[in-house]
Amino acid sequence: MSGSVYNRTELDRNTDIPGQLADPQLVADLFLREGHGFVEKLNGDFAIFILKPDEKQAFLIRDHLGICPVAWVTEGKTLLFSSDITSLARYFSDGRNIDSEFLLGYFKYTDYRKTPDERIRKLLPGHILHFSERGIELKKYWEPEKVRLEREMSYDSMLHDLKALVTDAVRIRSDDRYTAGAHVSSGIDSGIVSALARKEYSLQSHFCGLSWSPAGDFDFRVKYDERELVLISCENAGIRPLFSEMGEDEFPKYISAFYHNRGYFSEDETSDRAVALGVNLIFSGFGGDEFISTGHSGIDLDLLRGLRFRTFFRKNSIKSPKKFIRHFLFFVVNPLLGILDRRTRRAFRDDATYLKKSYRKSNREALRNFYFHKSRRRMHLNVFDFYNIPERCESWHIMGFRKGILYRYPLLDKRIVEYMLSVPSELLCRTGHFRPLLREISKGIVTEEVRLNESKNDPVYWSWMDGLFKSAAIRVMDEINIWRGNTDLDFVDFGLLSDAVAAYRSKSAPDDDMVLFRTLVYLKSIHEFTGVYRRQITTGAA
């Protein structure tokens, strides 16, 4: 077993199992008593393997949200599995090219369930794999789509319940065996999670707030400096704020580490800082956007479908006709008709500029799951099919494991997900705030400056990263001819890319061509990944 079970108190109260049992012992005892159905009682982040040798059966189980990674493959009558997905794929590689869909995630929307080798499959969140002489049987044990809408729910009870759930989700993930820290930013998700986590670790002398934003002074022309909000938030919560010191000379190291960081350069650097500070458990507010801190997606369609016209027009005032029409098109017409807005279409074209034409189109199912929500409930459920949450969590889990770091995501507690599926959309329209629920339940927990900041953007961070990408891209421009010989990069239009680099160097192209710079950086990363992947096939290294 890897991972943790968080609802031990509840399980101890409802069974006669001794409370001092370690998690693997608890799982074994529950399985012997109840069979594989025991997993429905668990609340945690886990990957579990159970072997019954006398009956020639095995069970592989993944947690509800897919926080802990696990992939599998069969070879004859043998089941092989691993939490290190890339290493499992590498073990079975016979020299074939790496699946391009696995490599193309930074250029278009792909199926994020893909692995480097098409034979290796990720066990999906909330699923059990049963392996026996009859072969493989996959069963879904968690069915959030069956959660019923509570139409009689009141606004006050909703706020009370969700505040209690968020507070408890942080509490049960706290473990004084570890030195904890938390991600901090100008956002409400990280604000409430970090503040609540600090309270749980009140006896820890220093509680570090780890920000992706840079330390130091910068002459960026931005709307606001998110670091000021970070400082206010951290001072209020008793958190020590720490900003990134990564510079132009350090950034290339993280670009070349794609094999371990999967392109999460900032988190790779952040986890290095955590290790240096002795922090080995990081609380993250990731996952709030998709559930408890949802914004507009699907809500307007719910109101119209339910004939809640008064609520709809109170939420979307027609006093500003242009704003109303723009909002109506974006959140009502476009999802119904499956139309992407002009800005998004342009962004997709830009990201795929230097791919060969046959590779440029995004996965249609991924687009539908991310953009075309015909109800708020469908938006929540589409998250599971889009797979963006498990993809990030499994990537960070593997990267953190190599450094001795655990990640905890309280806003991805299964109870919060189930509760949000029961909430009527009209209850989310009581205030004029964007992403209203966390703003309401965070009163008294975070400062008003953070609570009322409705921007999701961290402008200093993104301006700083643009500079790092530009500097790194210029350094690797001469490597294009080396990349040409990499058959795993067959999806790249190297002719077009070389012409763009030549135009940039001759100053006949814009000096701030971020599409070109980002393409070069990610291609460098992917090239390095494929090199490590193939070298380790040859050497058999872990």
Image (spheres, rainbow, N blue to C red):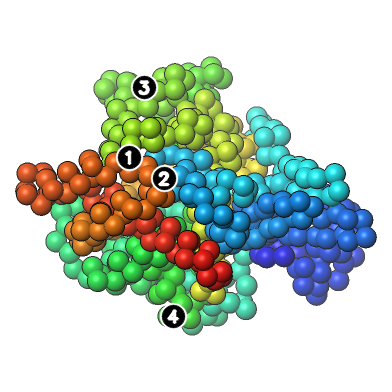
How far across and down, in percent of the image, does residue 340 sit? Answer: 37, 27
The residue sitting at 37% across, 44% down in the picture is 490
Q: Secondary structure at mark 4?
A: helix
Label 2 with label 1: CB-CB less than 8 Å = yes
Expressed as whole percent of the image width and height from the top left, the position of residue 119 reads: 62, 47
The residue depicted at 47 percent of the width and 20 percent of the height is 336
Helix, strand or loop at disc 1? loop
Question: In the image, what residue type sits under mark 1?
Answer: Leu
Answer whether residue 448 is visible to the viewer in this image.
no
Classed neighbour count for the residue bearing mark 2: other residues with Cα under 10 Å, few (<14), some (14–19), many (≥20): many
Which residue lies under the disc numbered 2?
104
Look at mark 4 in the image and give the residue it sits on.
277
10 Å neighbourhood of mark 4: few (<14), some, or many (≥20)?
few
Amino acid type, mark 2: Leu
The disc, 2 or 1, on the residue closer to the chain's N-terminal end is 2
- Marked residue nearer the N-terminal end (3 or 1): 3
Name the residue tied to disc 1.
355
| Residue at which label 3 appears | 329
Q: Nearer the viewer, residue 336 or 135?
A: 135
Residue type indicated by callout 3 = Leu
As drawn, 253 above or below 307: below
Badge 3 or badge 4: first in the primary sequence = 4
State which quarter of the image contains the C terminus.
bottom right
**Distance from the alpha carbon under mark 3 to that under mark 1:** 31 Å
The earlier-in-sequence mark between 4 and 2 is 2
Mark 4 to mark 2 CA distance (whole Å): 34 Å
Name the mark nearer the viewer: 3 or 4.
4
Q: Earlier in the sequence, mark 3 or mark 2?
A: 2
